[in-house]
Amino acid sequence: MIAQRTLKTLTQAVGVGLHSGQRVELTLRPAAPDTGIVFRRVDLPEPVDIPVNATSVTDTRLASTISSGGAKVHTIEHLMSACAGLGIDNLMVDITAEEVPILDGSAASFVYLLQSAGIEMQRAPKRFLRVKKPVEVREGEGKQLKWARLDPYHGYKLAFEIEFDHPAVTATGQRVEFDLGSGQYAREIARARTFGFTRDVEMMRSHGLALGGGLDNAIVMDDVKVLNADGLRYQDEFVKHKILDAMGDLYIVGKPLLAAYSAYRSGHAMNNQLLRALLAQPDSYEVVTFEQDSQAPRGFAQLALSW
């Protein structure tokens, strides 16, 4: 049986929010089968649980935000990506502020935290959401065109293409395809950092955003080059970070997908629109389990490789 997964023990991290600049403590705890991933705002007078699902997303400007009542948690996509990459089904996330810490700007620190806590198989079948027919969302035309799509696939693979008119980006690979069944998420995707441009920083900060951003947790570019002293972690780090984000955004659906995702210039908003479009068509998907490991897609029965 392909089983659900949680942590063996709790693990903790302290950091700052990318946009808020606030200090935040994060505690990741094991959770019972069929709990899903639940964020708990423990800093509020009465703690509030915010279960992760596609309809709990209430803001997608620069990050994915979920909410319940008046309680919110911003920038959940990097932690969600790590959970998707490692196949974590059930997790309680205690958080002391309204934004997940950015740590190093990638999912690598979250992968390290999850793997250091240990991953435990549970006595319950893992439930996959299998896409049965194509679902697509599109926006704009010509140079403004953006789209994202899910197609049937026995496994989970993602293809993403970006298009930035910037010398540092155009000099790198702008399209990448990744298959989760390779077991190479930690090595090939997780270390890709978020990125931004100095010309946008002052505008963002005037709107109360990017207050915690800097060279230690993002790739920063001026008009011509990357400013980080150590350069890029991958030759195609920019587009790999978009794959990382997409994996986190799509895992918000609450179950691992069996699908081929492809996208052109998509982002948090369009990824959530794609999930909602999928869920709005009940004949486009089904929930499945695998009693035998041999029935599952390649690589899905094994734990993900560490570094």
Image (cartoon, rainbow, N blue to C red):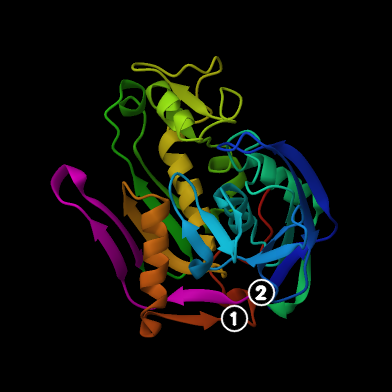
Type of amino acid under label 2? Ile
Looking at the image, residue 290 lies above or below residue 233: below
The verdict on residue 60 being magenta is: no
- The spot of residue 182 in percent (x, y) is 54, 54
Q: Could you tell me how far apart the alpha carbons at marks 2 and 1 are, in whole angstroms? A: 7 Å
- Asked whether the viewer can see residue 235, the reply is no
Query: In the image, which residues are magenta?
Result: 126-150
Q: Quadrant of the C terminus?
A: top right
Q: Nearer the viewer, residue 176 or 226?
A: 226
- Horizontally, residue 61 falls left or right of residue 29, namely left
Helix, strand or loop at disc 1? Answer: loop
Q: Residue at x 56, y 24 (%)?
A: 214
Label placed on residue 289: 1
**Residues packed near mark 1 inside 10 Å, few (<14), some (14 to 19) or many (20 plus):** some
Task: Classify 112 as above or below 203.
Answer: below
Task: Verify CB contact (< 8 Å) between mark 2 and mark 1.
Answer: yes
> Furthest-front residue in view?
45
Placement of 136 over or under 131, stated as above or below: above
Task: Check the picture and name the quadrant holding the N terminus.
Answer: bottom right
Left/right of residue 282 with respect to residue 192 in the rendered view: left
SS class, disc 2: loop
Instruction: Please name the residue that numbered disc 2 is placed on.
Output: 2
